[in-house]
Image (spheres, coloured by chain):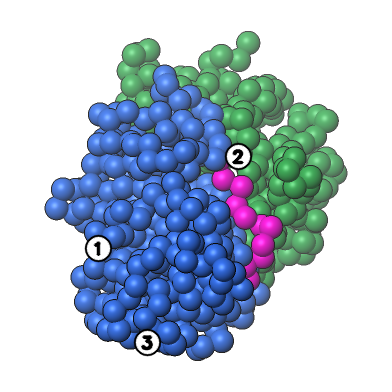
Chain colours: A blue, B green
Amino acid sequence: MFFLKNAEVIRNDRVGDGLYELEFRAPQIASHGEPGQFIHVEVKPHPAESLSPLLRRPFSLYGVDSRQGAISILYRIRGLGTSILARAKPGECLSVLGPLGRGFTLPAKESVTLLVGGGMGIAPLVYLADCLTRLSCKVTVLYGAETASELVALEKLEQKEVKCHVATMDGSKGYEGFVTDLLTCVHAGESASMSIEKQADLLSGSPGESHTLSSGRTLSDREANDIHRQPDIIYSCGPLEMMAHVARFADERGIPGEVSLESNMACGVGVCLGCALKLKGGNAGYAKVCSDGPVFPMDRVEFTVGEEARLQ
Amino acid sequence: MNLATDLGGIKLANPVIMASGTFGYGFGYESLIDPGDVGAIITKATTREPWTGNPPPRIAETPCGMLNAIGLENPGIEVFLNEHLPRLESSGAVVIVNIAGRTFEEYVELASMIETVRGISGIEINISCPNVDFGGMQLGTAPDMVYRIVKAVKEKTHLPVMPKLSPNVTDIIEIAKAAESAGADAISMINTLQGMAVDIEMKRPVLGNIFGGLSGPAIKPIALRMVYQVYRAVDVPILGGGGIMSAKDAIEFLLVGATAVSIGTGTFVNPRLAMEVKAGIEDYMRRHSHTDLREIIGAAVL
């Protein structure tokens, strides 16, 4: 079930360089929105009634506060649509369609879960983490970004009952390098007294610098045991290359997993067939990111790098 | 106030029609639009066998418009008749089926199959899709081809037949006249304009199909001009559309001769647009003291 609402902007905060968090008042969407689902937002320059940009923009649910009737999205200015969205002021109303799509499959209570997010891909995982902790799941988040200032969801994650490990490409926080390098350490089970960022440093062959690159946080044995137990399910969202790596990791170990994908969309509800995606196996046809997804089983996605959606 | 209109034998309670390919089989927008509340629903193009459509990316946004190259993806006529039509029929919607094929024989076979089922009020012949190798625009850009296919379909059905014309032609009047002389009961226009978009970073076309069909408000002036021309040239009623984003846009089409209007891309932007257009047409008629829709059809044609 979805709704079309003129939703009031509660806040639209700049949270980093070109990065924004926008909160809407949308009680019905808040009470129905599941993690991994998205909203389709009309973006209009001022004055309203402009016909360009024409199409709505899809954003994953980042936060849902059903008590306050509020939902939030996290976005980076990538083109015309998002740059207009960044100018929306509190008190303004934007047309919001949602919640749309098929979200993440929630596991059984008390499952061990691993979430791997890169860049803005962290957005649906933050809301997912809320729902998982409510199910008393053990939640480990591996969170990667270019640089420390882009880890805009970190504070939110650290307030939750989750274990969060970070990687930045420039080493300004956590492990220096790809967030997927942390995967091996999560699973290794050795050196439980060492932080996984530090383990990753060692494994990546830069031991000399590891002590300065690591966040320094040391895990207790109990924490380490939790982390080192093989996850029951892995969820991921971020750059295709990152998700492809996560999918390989999951496949090699026989762990089920899901990824959330993005695509250019027109309708957002499955009628225009514009956001076609070829899945592995199954029939010869195309899945639709908006209505069959945006969440798909990891082992069904091709991860053709270079076909990143050209969103604005 | 009488909003009822007759589109070549297809009786409509109001003139607002959901365009093919933008409303699925009537229920994609769930409760936002009741298919029984609009004048008619034109289904996604239906072929004899399932078509998988074109490789992605299939859409690209352009100034005041969008390009699409879906490639007529659809599950085939049997799935439509068995799975989608019963629900549409029970909603009370007026259903017009858009048919497409790779051969003349396929169009004829589809027309025959539709002839025998209940719940369908008319056939829109897709001879104007710019995104398929055969069975689309190629059929609709030569007057003799249009004549042959309309005539062949007409011979197989008692249902009103309405070819959807391509704007990608030298002379739209010639095409419309060919359709009329072949027995078309109405004319639907316009389909998308062929175009393309380029990704300068990747140095390649944006769309997987390279070319796509342009729709949205960018094409409205062209669509209006063509409806105006065809209205003056033929006697059959016209379903007019192309870039309708408001009641005002729809009224423009009625004034240049459209008997009914089709809402397409605008639904993606505003899923409630069709209902707003219907209400806006009523408001307009009240303001101008019209009591019957027929009073405004063609009123701006000089």
Magenta includes A300?
A: yes
Which residue is tagged 1? A160
- The numbered mark at residue B61 is 2
Please rate how many residues cluster around mark 2, counting C-alpha atoms within 10 Å: few if below 14, some from 14 to 19, many from 20.
Answer: many
Residues under numbered marks 2 and 1 in contact, where contact means CB atoms less than 8 Å apart? no
Give amino acid for label 2: Glu
Residue at image x 45%, y 70%? A197
For the C terminus of chain A, the image quarter is: top right
Give amino acid for label 3: Arg
| Position of residue B117 in the picture relative to residue B212 (left or right) | left
Q: Secondary structure at mark 2?
A: strand
Q: Residue furthest left?
A: A67
Give amino acid for label 1: Lys
- Chain at numbered mark 2: B
- Chain at numbered mark 1: A
- The numbered mark at residue A229 is 3
Q: Main secondary structure of the magenta part?
A: loop
The stretch in magenta equals: A296-312
Q: In front here: B263 or B240?
A: B263
Q: Is residue A33 above or below residue B298?
A: below
Q: Position of residue A195 (x, y in %)?
A: 40, 73
Q: Position of residue B296 (x, y in %)?
A: 48, 19
Question: How far is mark 2 from mark 3, CA to CA?
Answer: 46 Å
Residues under numbered marks 3 and 1 in contact, where contact means CB atoms less than 8 Å apart? no
Which of the two discs, 2 and 3, sits closer to the camera? 3
- Chain at numbered mark 3: A
Q: Is residue B243 above or below residue A34?
A: above
Q: In front here: B189 or B51?
A: B51
Q: Secondary structure at mark 3?
A: loop
